[in-house]
Image (cartoon, coloured by chain):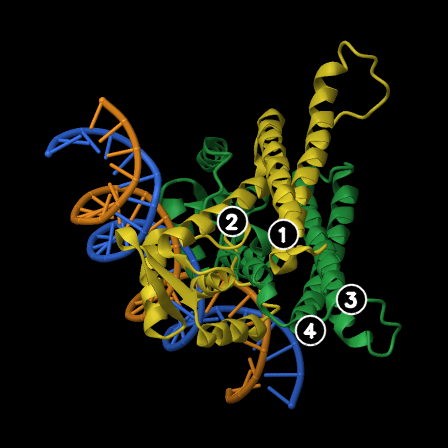
Chain colours: A yellow, B green, C orange, D blue
Amino acid sequence: MALRYAILGLLLDRPSSGYDLAGRFADVIGAYAWDAKHSQIYPELRRLDQEGLVEVVDRGARRRTTYRCTGEGLTALRAWLMAAPTSTGGVKNEHALRLFLLGVLEPEEALEVLRQTEAGARGKVQDLEAEFAALQERTGSASGGPLGLTVQLGIHSFRATAQWARWASEQLGADADLDRSRADQCGSGSSAG
Amino acid sequence: MALRYAILGLLLDRPSSGYDLAGRFADVIGAYAWDAKHSQIYPELRRLDQEGLVEVVDRGARRRTTYRCTGEGLTALRAWLMAAPTSTGGVKNEHALRLFLLGVLEPEEALEVLRQTEAGARGKVQDLEAEFAALQERTGSASGGPLGLTVQLGIHSFRATAQWARWASEQLGADADLDRSRADQCGSGSSAG
DNA sequence: TCTTGACATGTCGAACTCGACATGTCACTC
DNA sequence: GAGTGACATGTCGAGTTCGACATGTCAAGA
């Protein structure tokens, strides 16, 4: 049931076609909240239309059909948001799982993954910070409006990932270096693992 | 395919029964990486056993069957971990989605959700910090060993969520207070909505 | 010994999700 | 006017996931 509310939320921000929605899922929201492919989105839009939660506002070229969230849709979305604010609801995050299992790899392999993780996360932070600055300017608000909250959540999340990756690298690097560099550097007393 | 690798990873840390695994999924890993119910876990364990990736090490009371990850299982897991370290792979996180859509709610409703979010996240941070300290002591290592990395990832993630929730509350609170407290506090010029 | 509740596993149908395949439109270019 | 590629939607089968129902074990207490 989460998919339909994700769609309603996106439409509430701005009327969109299925194609647009697919792009928006692949973009921001799909990275840390909910992802969906067009093969799911189109049928769901039709269902939502039948139930009156969205409505068609435009049919453009190439069968492009633009939908908008109705009042009923907003009511449904808000009911869902208020319904179970503390439930966690079955997270699936393959990237996080890989990080979770990092201890299985050899330190040098893990270091490589961590390097990529940190670089990727820092890139995301930069992108989102630019987006946030643009929002601040556009809305004339320090918080960047409703979307600003969302963007900041992303910034906080990716920054935390980057910081953790850095910390983890240092831990692993220290362990790995110990074994190797004690040979040619001055080995100031440290117990072997 | 992620489920089996999550299971292999958990078994690698410590041999467990299906029942144990269900608890461990519900506990730490399920909160931010991968969740699974027992109705999925038991069949997958049998499949892994047939494929030689895990093996039975004990049959206790109440049909309790304890599995261990085999060398073949470790090989498979490491191959998977090294295979596609950058793919994001379709995140599903209902809790994050709710936060993502927070702008839809009235400020006061959103504030309530944020309050609960912050409290929950800080609770998680405390739990995990205690676990990390225990790990440091048990392993005699500042990094807490392989599991320490994982626990720190959780700490970083939940701390980021808590900090964001606090920030978002302040933003919303400022907006909401403006409308109300201008009446009895000194109303320094601000345009009405 | 009977009941209760936690432990432990099994199974099934419904719903969800994905990738692959398919169809057609439109702007641009050669 | 034929070819190309991005735009835009549709569909289907295979695999995944979940909740609900089911079965049985064992310890503790009434």
Q: Using residue A160 as the reference point, say whether residue B95 is left or right of it.
A: left
Q: Using residue A104 as the reference point, say whether residue A34 is left or right of it.
A: left
Residue lying at 44% horizontally and 35% vertically, measured from the top left: B76
Q: Nearer the viewer, mark 3 or mark 4?
A: 3
Q: Which residue is mark 1?
A: A138
Q: Are marks 2 and 1 on the same chain?
A: yes
* Quadrant occupied by the C terminus of chain B: bottom right
Q: Which residue is mark 3?
A: B190
**Cα separation between marks 2 and 1:** 33 Å
- Amino acid type assigned to the residue bearing label 2 in the image: Asn
- Tag 2 secondary structure: loop
- Whether the residues at callouts 3 and 4 have beta carbons within 8 Å, the answer is no
- Whether the residues at callouts 3 and 2 have beta carbons within 8 Å, the answer is no
Residue B63 seen anywhere in this rendered image of the structure? no
The percent position of residue A149, horizontal first and vertical second, equals 65, 57
* Corner quadrant of residue A65: bottom left
Q: Which mark is residue A93?
A: 2
Other-residue count near label 2 (Cα within 10 Å), few / some / many at <14 / 14–19 / ≥20 = many
- Amino acid type assigned to the residue bearing label 3 in the image: Ser
- Give the chain of mark 3: B
- Tag 1 secondary structure: helix
Residue lying at 76% horizontally and 56% vertically, measured from the top left: B126
- Amino acid type assigned to the residue bearing label 4 in the image: Glu
